[in-house]
Amino acid sequence: MQKKPEILIRHKNIQSLVEKQSLLLNKATELVKTGGYIIYSVCSILSDEGKNQIQKFLKTQKSISFENVFGELKKFGKIINNNGFLTLPSLLNKEGGVDGFFITCLKKNKL
C-alpha cells in the first residue's frame, strides 16, 4: 500500500481474495508430504488475509502446526502470537520504510 495506495480502492471486496487464499492453503496441504513445510505469505496487512486466515485454516487442518522461525526478524516487524510475522508500512521509517505483508511457516505432521 505504501507504493500503491490505490490498492485500497481496487480491492473493496477482499472476501474473494480470502476465498482463493483458502483454496490455495487447502491444496498445499494435499501436496506437501508429512514433515514438509508450507510457507504462507500475503502482501497484505489485513487480518482476514493473514492472521485470521491462518487461524481458520488450522481449525480444519489438524495435521498442520506452526513453526516458530521468526526470532531474528523481530527488529523488522511484529511477531504475532509466535506464529506469524507482520510488517507495516509505518515500521522502519528512518531506514526508508517497508512494505506491509504477513508470513507464517506451517508444518505438516502425522495425524
Image (cartoon, rainbow, N blue to C red):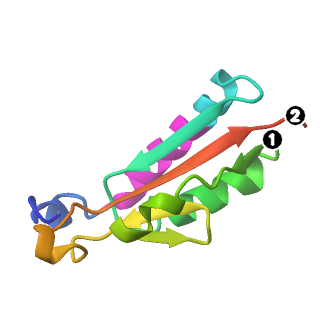
Residue at point 22% right, 70% down? 89
Q: Position of residue 48 (x, y in %)?
A: 47, 65
Q: Position of residue 66 (x, y in %)?
A: 68, 52
Residue at the extreme front of the image, as rendered? 72
The image quadrant that residue 93 belongs to is bottom left
Tally the marks.
2
Do callouts 2 and 1 mark residues in contact (Cβ within 8 Å)? yes
Measure how far apart labels 2 and 1 are at the Cα level.
6 Å
Q: Of the residues shown, which amino acid type is indicated by label 1?
A: Ser
Q: Of the residues shown, which amino acid type is indicated by label 2?
A: Lys
Identify whether 107 is placed above or below 90: above
Residue at point 54% right, 71% down? 80
Local SS, label 1: loop
Left or right of 40 on screen, residue 45: left
User: Label 2 neighbourhood size at 10 Å, few (<14), some (14-19), many (20+)?
Assistant: few
Q: Which residue is mark 1?
A: 63
Q: Which residue is mark 2?
A: 110
User: Label 1 neighbourhood size at 10 Å, few (<14), some (14-19), many (20+)?
Assistant: some
Pick whichever, 62 or 90, lies toward us.
90
Residue 65 visible, this angle: yes
Q: Which residues are magenta?
A: 13-25
Left or right of 35 on screen, residue 72: left
Q: Position of residue 28 (x, y in %)?
A: 59, 30
Q: Is residue 83 magenta?
A: no
Identify whether 74 is placed above or below 106: below
Local SS, label 2: loop
